[in-house]
């Protein structure tokens, strides 16, 4: 799964990330037999530069272009405009057939969640753009991962406060064959009610392609901390149902984006409610013992949630946070036992 470190300074997070990868060069371990390595001569110089064995952390942590001074009069951008990404992915896949974007028919190569499903894990501690802290820290990293890994069909993002609690559930990939973004939510709440909690962005699937880069570009401008994020928060509170007054968050921003530009984005967004791609901890943790007694892993829904999301459970004292004690901390232990 993928998450964002929130317990150290950016410099500490980067140091932790560098240390991790100095011990293990492969961010994503592709299971390549030793026999295959011997067949290529076993010489490190002959390793395919596109393989995970040759993965360079600088692909993620360092921009190819020198950083330019930002114009305060221009909207925030995640990076240089990328066009024809679909064509570039297709070209890369043709040139690297050993890394197909589908592991088998109907089973896409996915970055990230657990090897039990053939999905690889990358846990992030780095803050790649100081302007995009907090809710928004995921966006620069997601963009870099998509551009660095044309072999992946889907990226599965999970916030660091989300926990995978059903290791046996297989996602219904065929259901999403015509969609590029899958989030837990309800169409009526998003499109008709414009409710700020009509979906959740703590756990979502994003198909790698031009569409993904474009929606990230449309989604991100409310994110820079400071005046932009504060003013955007006021607009979101005004426009979205029942939203309290606080700075702009990525969840409210995408609800607003979909509700106001449904014709541009809506047909490629799947709002999933048949299983818990995001399961709110407050309605789940008290029922774990009942679930264990009456049900079994592999269901993914209210009977045995795929994901339990401890949204709001951060001891930072901001809006929506719960005190770092009591029922929140008591819920963590049962969650770990439940998924184990």
Image (cartoon, helix red, strand yellow):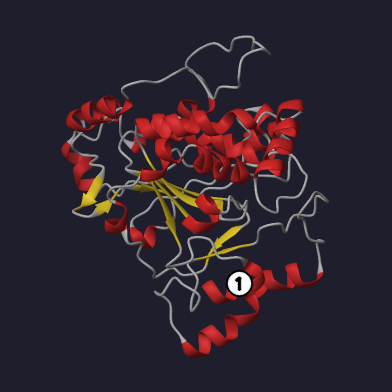
Quarter where residue 106 is shown: bottom left
Q: Position of residue 30 (x, y in %)?
A: 32, 46
| Depicted 74 relative to depicted 87: above or below | above
Q: Is residue 231 left or right of residue 317?
A: left
Q: Which one is in front, 20 or 10?
A: 10
The residue carrying pointer 1 sits among few (fewer than 14), some (14 to 19) or many (20 or more) residues within 10 Å by Cα, namely: some
Q: Which residue is mark 1?
A: 335
Q: Position of residue 33 (x, y in %)?
A: 24, 49
- Residue at (39, 68) in percent of width and height: 169
| Depicted 197 relative to depicted 336: above or below | above
Q: Position of residue 317 (x, y in %)?
A: 83, 51
- Residue at (64, 9) in percent of width and height: 69
Q: Residue furthest front?
A: 192
Q: Position of residue 18 (x, y in %)?
A: 57, 34
Quarter where residue 326 is shown: bottom right
Query: Quick one: SS at disc 1?
Result: helix
- Residue at (71, 57) in percent of width and height: 312
Q: Residue furthest bottom?
A: 293
| Residue 26 in view of the camera | no
């Amino acid at each position: 799964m993928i998450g964002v470190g929130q317990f150290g300074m950016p410099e500490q997070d980067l140091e932790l990330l560098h240390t991790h990868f100095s011990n293990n060069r492969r961010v994503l371990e592709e299971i390549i037999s030793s026999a295959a390595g011997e067949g290529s001569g076993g010489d490190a110089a002959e390793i395919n530069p596109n393989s995970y064995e040759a993965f360079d952390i600088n692909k993620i942590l360092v921009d190819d272009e020198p950083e330019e001074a930002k114009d305060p009069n221009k909207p925030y951008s995640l990076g240089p405009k990328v066009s024809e990404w679909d064509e570039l992915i297709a070209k890369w896949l043709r040139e690297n057939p050993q890394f197909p974007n589908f592991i088998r028919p109907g089973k896409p190569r996915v970055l990230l969640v657990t090897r039990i499903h053939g999905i690889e894990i990358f846990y992030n501690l780095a803050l790649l753009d100081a302007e995009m802290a907090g809710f928004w820290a995921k966006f620069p990293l997601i963009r870099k991962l998509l551009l660095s890994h044309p072999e992946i069909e889907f990226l599965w993002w999970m916030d660091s406060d989300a926990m995978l609690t059903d290791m046996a559930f297989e996602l219904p990939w065929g259901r999403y064959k015509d969609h590029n973004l899958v989030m837990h939510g309800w169409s009526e709440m998003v499109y008709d009610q414009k409710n700020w909690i009509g979906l959740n962005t703590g756990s979502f699937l994003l198909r790698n392609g031009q569409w993904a880069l474009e929606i990230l570009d449309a989604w991100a401008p409310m994110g820079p901390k400071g005046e932009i994020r504060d003013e955007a928060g006021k607009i979101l509170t005004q426009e979205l149902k029942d939203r309290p007054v606080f700075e702009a968050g990525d969840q409210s921003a995408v609800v607003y984006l979909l509700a106001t530009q449904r014709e541009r984005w809506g047909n490629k967004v799947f709002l999933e409610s048949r299983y818990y791609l995001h399961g709110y901890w407050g309605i789940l943790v008290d029922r774990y013992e009942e679930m264990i007694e009456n049900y079994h892993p592999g269901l993914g829904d209210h009977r045995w949630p795929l994901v339990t999301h401890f949204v709001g459970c951060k001891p930072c004292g901001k809006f929506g946070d719960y005190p770092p004690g009591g029922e929140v901390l008591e819920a963590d232990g049962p969650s770990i036992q439940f998924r184990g």
